[in-house]
Image: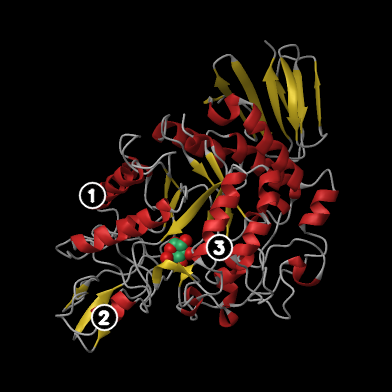
Amino acid sequence: MSWIQSTTIYQIYPRSFYDSNDDGIGDIQGIIQKLDYIKDLGFETIWISPFYTSPQQDFGYDIADYFSIDKDYGTVQDVEQLIEAAHQRKLKIVLDMVINHTSNQHPWFLESKQNTTNDKADWYIWRDKPNNWKSIIGTKAWHFVEERNQYYYTSFLPFQPDLNYQNETVKQTMFNVCKFWLDKGADGFRLDIFNCIIKDKHFRNNPFSLLHGIPTIDQPGGNFQNRKYSVNQPENFELAKDLRAIINQYQPDRLLLGEVFGEHHVKKQYLGNGNDGLHIIFLFDIIHFKFKASFFKERIKAYEKNYPFPYQPVVNFSNHDQWRSQFRLKNNINKAKLLTLLQMTMRAVPVSYYGEEIGMTNAYIPIKQAKDKLAHAFTWIPEWIAKRMPVPINRDNCRTPMQWNSNKNAGFSNANTTWLSVVDDYKQRNVVQAQADKDSLYYTYKTLLNLRKTNNSINKGKLNLIEDTPNAIIMYERIYETEKHIIILCFSNKKISIPLADDKYTILLKLNDSFTWENNTLELSNYNGLIFREIV
Ligand code: GLC
């Protein structure tokens, strides 16, 4: 089994992780200084949101030069140093690669938009007349440019023009971008909106759909449109294979992690036969969890059915586009511990978002004050509705600085002002405080991350869901060769009993002390969860 199927991933939003030069913005040297923290916590791979040169309209997801690093974050030498320092610690570094679109400030686009005859004239998607396609967030996707008397297409926001992959030179250029970073030792890529990249070459209109809401990540339809011709085209599945062929030329293995949206039978096609597509993809239907055993049981069943070995599901509950899970759990640390137990023991690659390990929650920044340009596209949504939406319209809320300690700016920066302010609970919720409290969520993470390293069944064994359990209980076995563990999770604060032979298992981990285990009966409550090891 490759490291890819058994790894654990920690996502860093570089702007908010650690500021080494006191300008109020996190940077690459800051990440280097915190590598030991991540290593000690127990994660094995770090995925870093984009840090390339960018006008920062979408904070790096709008790239203006793929071969240099934005002045806010450092230099190419800093990234080389980061990769080396990570490798010395046996950590992998996965870069974020945005190949669907560039910034509208990229020299390629500046040239392309001038006229219809320049060298880059068909590097982007230009049409005399727009068809009916909308962006994946439901906004206008075609934008008029006077110089060309034509419209260009954007899958996301207007300043992120989509590249034209029908043009072979564009495709090869973007593959060369990937090779450039692989040659520098990057351990792979998280691929931004990968399912949007190649569009229908006939530009057929998308069919009408009754889905009327704003599209969400697990439901790319919406705004009365089925995105039949603008996302998940068969050529996109082929593109996954082309990229895999490139990274297969590198040793040791490099990772391709796709951000793709759609139903399982569609998304699965990005994985090819298990050896010739992307290695893993986000399964966004779990990120918007309901804190209910039945919700997660359904997911486990669906993942076991759709992604059996050698496929590997990916489980994350927070990222830079979502409300933080701790916020959705209303700050209930016992619930957060239970989710962590599930995430770290399901058959999956767990991906955690910086600060999740200390239970960081969201800020409350109204749309009108947003730095996030996505919010600017939705200023018509009243604040009381925005607050209740399943995805944040203002993503600043989940991107606030990491809370390291109780000093100024939570120890993130010495600057007088930081790009976003820290959340005001930082005096009680920070790394120093978490490390001093043996009962903290931080130690649940640390213990579980280390258990994964020392127990094969938990990180690479097969999973058997035991279906005949009380409603609020999830129970599964993880089995690898002769090693077997049973994981039992209680999604209730009330007492629930289940039979469990007390001479066959020993307790490897318990989340809290709310349980008894006598006369072959386990009784647990208070969102407790336990790992048992079979005695052989
Ligand atoms: C992805 C990123 C998001 C970004 C968008 C456009 O969904 O996660 O942050 O704004 O793509 O690149």
Instruction: Classify residue 534 as left or right of residue 91.
Output: right
Q: Which is nearer the N-term, disc 3 or disc 1?
A: 3
Are the two marked residues, 3 and 1, in contact with CB atoms closer than 8 angstroms?
no
Query: Which residue position holds label 1?
Result: 234
Q: CA distance from mark 3 to mark 1?
A: 38 Å
Name the colour scheme.
Answer: secondary structure
Q: Position of residue 516 (x, y in %)?
A: 82, 25
**Whether residue 275 is situated above or below residue 261 in the rendered picture:** above
Q: Inspect the image, locate mark 2, and give the three-letter code of the amino acid beneath it.
A: Glu
Q: Is mark 3 within 8 Å of ligand 1?
A: no
The amino acid on which the numbered mark 1 sits, given as a three-letter code, is Pro
Mark 1: which secondary structure? Answer: helix
The residue that label 3 is drawn on is 78
The residue depicted at 80 percent of the width and 52 percent of the height is: 434
Residue 499 seen: yes
- Mark linked to residue 111: 2
> Ligand 1 falls in which quarter?
bottom left
Label 2: which secondary element: helix
Instruction: Tell me where residue 334 sits by quadrant.
Output: top right
Where residue 141 sits, quadrant-wise, is bottom left
Q: Position of residue 181 (x, y in %)?
A: 42, 56
Which amino acid type corresponds to the residue marked 3 in the rendered image?
Asp
The quadrant in which residue 249 appears is top left
Task: Estimate how packed mark 2 is, as few (under 14), some (14 to 19) or many (20 or more) residues with alpha carbons within 10 Å.
Answer: some
